[in-house]
Amino acid sequence: MKRFVLVFLFPCFLCCLFSICLLVEGRSNISSSSLSEVQNSIMHNLSTILSHQPSNANPNPCSWTSWVKCFTSSSSSSSSVVIGINLSEYGLSTETTKNTTFFSLLCQIDSLQFLNLSHNNFESLPVSFMSNCTARLRLKILDVSFNQLSGQLPNFSQFTGLVSLNLSMNKLSGKIDRQLHGLVLLTSLNLCYNSITGNLPMNLSSALEELLLSNNKFEGSIPEEMFKYVNLTVLDLSQNQLNGFIPDGIEGLQKLKKIFLSGNNLTGGLPPKMSMIKTLSQFAANNNNFNGSIPSGITTNLQFLDLSYNNLSGDLPHDLLSHGSLGHLDLTDNSLSGPIPPISGNLLTNLKRLRLGQNELNGSIPGEIGDISGLMYLELNDNQFEGYIPVHLQKCKNLSLLNLAGNHLTGPFPKELASLTQLQVLKLQMNNLDGSIPDEIYQLVNLNTLNLSQNSFIGEISPLISNLKKVAFLNLNDNKLGGQIPDSIDDIGVYLIELQLANNKFNGSIPQMSSDLHITTLNLSSNLFMGPLPESLSKLYSLEVLDLSDNNFTGDIPSSFTKLGSLTILDLSNNHLTGILPNFPKYVNVITTGNNIQNVTNPNTPTPSQPRRRTNVVVVVIAVVGSVVVIGLLAALLFFVVSQRFNRVEDEDPLVRDNPSQVINGCFITSNNTHRSNIDFMKAMVAVSNPENLVLKTRFATHYKANMANGSTYTVKKLNWGDKMFQMGSHEKFEEELQVLGKLSNSNVMVPLAYALTQDNAYLFYENVHKGTVFDFLHKGLETALDWSSRYSIALGVAQGLTFLHGCTQPVVLLDLSTKSIHLKSLKEPQIGDIELCKVIDSFKSFGSLSAIAGSVGYMPPEYPYTMRVTMAGNVYSFGVILLELLTGKPPVSKGIELAKWALSYSARTIGKEQILDSSIKRTSPEVHSQMLSVLKVALSCVCASPESRPKMRNVLRMLFNAR
């Protein structure tokens, strides 16, 4: 609707623009006759709005304050000139202005000093505007960011008055030559988020204060000439392909406030003289290859320092944590060693983030950290710290994240830390902590992540665990806990997503669990549970992974388990179960090895514990029963045919009598006439009412195959309004979002063709290209069909589709990106599905928050539990997991261990990367092996713990292309 209104009003805007031209202090030399000709030309091309010409508005454009800025002379209040026009987010495009009248009118306003055309859809700027525009001589500020400009950077050399030029977030490519030559007044240049190549431009204005070139494809080294721009205050060269050292002379930029070099291939040491720049407040050089030690004095003036994901080594500088201006320090994933240097906690009043994880730091954790009163994030994980957790941390009252995992800490968990009531994430896994879990820990009522796994905790879980009403991820795996799980586990709350209690000594029976819980992963494997499998587990409708393996369960598998609509993995191996395996849907991977379970789909196959004689008896019985059933079916079929012949009603479809849902609104999105004529909404409702047409069921939707009257086939996806996650009652919003998505065009993205609404459900229609999902081919016995060539093509296709979605004017982020949401047209042609979920899911009507429903198990990035946001960086993480699945052939979660974490741990070993790759694939040829290692490097960069350090999808795509 908004887009329609903007396009509708645009011609009216053109008419108003004529008035501006006539009121610019008499400077316009258009005669009345020529003006009439231009206006008639406009109206001829825009005849659809002839009956909607501007009303009797104030003829003075300076009264239109929403998009016009004027200057009024102090000597004459009646003399005003237009100096600025702001048309940001007006829905303008190359198509709507293709007759160039729009830009011609702008050029006639020769008093124009600033022009904002950002957040539109221009694909190019007309030659007439670039070379023969009178207004270019006075224009000082030009903003055409967030458009669709493509091709080489336009030539702005004639815009000699420009002070600020912003062309960020476009699709510009090629090299920069002399397009910016002669702009001697230019102080701000922003070309971020394009695809510009070549070396960094060096023929720029000496007056330059802001140079923003991030997220392009610049290559080569940083030239010494860069430091001739002595007026620079901001320098952003991040996310490019730069290499080499930082040259000497950076200390000459005495006005520099911010420098960003992240995401390149820079090497060498950090400039020791950087501390001489007194004005410097922010320095980010993460995700490079810097080595050597961190120079002393580097934090003297800095407020923000990020050197994470490099190869820095040696001890931390003694004065690193002694300067009061510091607010953010991130040295994650380097090779730094030694103890944490002295901390002047009383001085560090501004420090909010202290991230020193994934290094080789040792010694004890200094209690002085507790004196940093404003600290919110403390990450010391994956180091070699020893001793106790300092009680002094209780003074950090604002702490929301505490990560001490992967160290050699000993002793009990300090009860005093229960005073950290703001704590949301507590990670202490992979240490040597012991004793019982104190009841005080359950006073941390704001926790949404609690991970105490891989320690030596003993005792039982207290019933007070029900106080953790906001916990989403609870992991107590691999301890020495025992006793029964308290019944109060059922009262934790609706936020709980993962409950991991594997490899302990829990016994007895599993407590009753109500449907109010929305657990997606329940892992109770390797314990001492006994008795029958509880029917109450069938109420956990959101359950995706249920692992009850390696226990002492007995009896039958409850048939009610087949009603777990979201279930994909059920591991019951190594118990004492008997009976016949219920008929689970084909998309559920059921593991029953080590039991006495008979699979009726293959009754002649004896289970390991069945005697041969018993098998033969069963075969005979089944054969006899089968014969009787077949005879009965033939008789029934004969009766049906005869009765139909005598009682047939012409053109009656017997399925219609099943009362399929009635369509209250059906709408086509596609402009393709073939699809419009093929799709029959009522015929589709009949198809989806038949369970035999079910193709795929995921957490958020059910997919059906629908045959139309002319023989064409479509995929129909049902979204259930009833689960209160979708925008029930907001049909207009739903339809607007789908209309936008329907206009997307990319061969690697499943775009809806039409939709139908019923009273209870929404149905989306797609081309039927479903040969199976990537998950099906990798993890359901079809892996031999996916050779490396197919896997690499799938990786490229998904990367291209995701890059396209992230690059849209309004970026499309995916709520649930996994191998189950990627459909295959062929073994080398993937399509990303479920692109509409993040648009149509209503987080306010869901059970808590968007983070509580975002993503599938194993694909969710580690920041979700405490950011509560679905982001592009999160999509990159999910894509990294998909790459790992393609490289390893392993599922995203195995025995409670996430594939990403497993791969990261192995990659740190000497020959670990070889152990990650799928052995059946990597041996194909040396070329395949080399390419897999290159793709593995891309995958590991995507699953970085830090979202800021993950590459953008356009860079991921580039790296995958380079891996050919």
Image (tube, grey):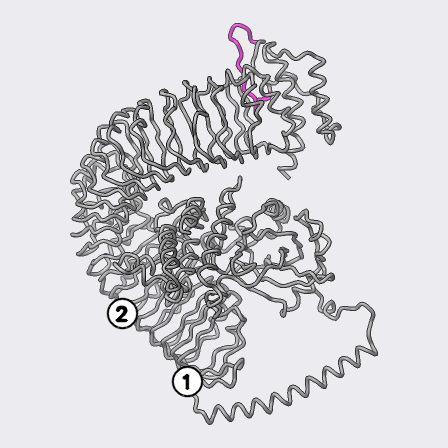
Q: Does residue 66 appear anywhere in the picture?
A: no
Is 444 positioned to the left or the right of 101 in the image? left
Image quadrant assignment for residue 26: top right
Q: Main secondary structure of the magenta part?
A: loop
The quadrant in which the N terminus is found is top right
Q: Does residue 486 appear anywhere in the picture?
A: yes
Task: Check disc 1 and give the amino acid type.
Answer: Pro
**Camera-side residue of 786 and 447:** 786
Q: Mark 1 falls on what kind of element?
A: loop
582 to 606, vertically: above or below: above
Alpha-carbon span between mark 1 and mark 2: 32 Å
Q: Residue at x 65, y 19 (%)?
A: 18
Query: Which residue lies under the disc numbered 2?
Result: 480
Magenta-tinted stretch: 64-77
Task: Check disc 2 and give the amino acid type.
Answer: Lys
Q: Residues within 10 Å of mark 1 (few under 14, many from 20)?
A: few
Image position, residue 186 (x, y; %): 41, 21
Q: Mark 2 falls on what kind of element?
A: strand
Count of number-bearing discs:
2
75 to 701, vertically: above or below: above
Query: Which residue lies under the disc numbered 1?
Result: 608
**Camera-side residue of 179 and 52:** 179
Image position, residue 610 (x, y; %): 43, 88
**Camera-side residue of 629 and 941:** 941
Q: Residue at x 63, y 49 (%)?
A: 731
Is 838 positioned to the left or the right of 287 in the image? right
Image position, residue 477 (x, y; %): 32, 66
**Camera-side residue of 44 and 683:** 44
Q: Residues within 10 Å of mark 2 (few under 14, many from 20)?
A: many
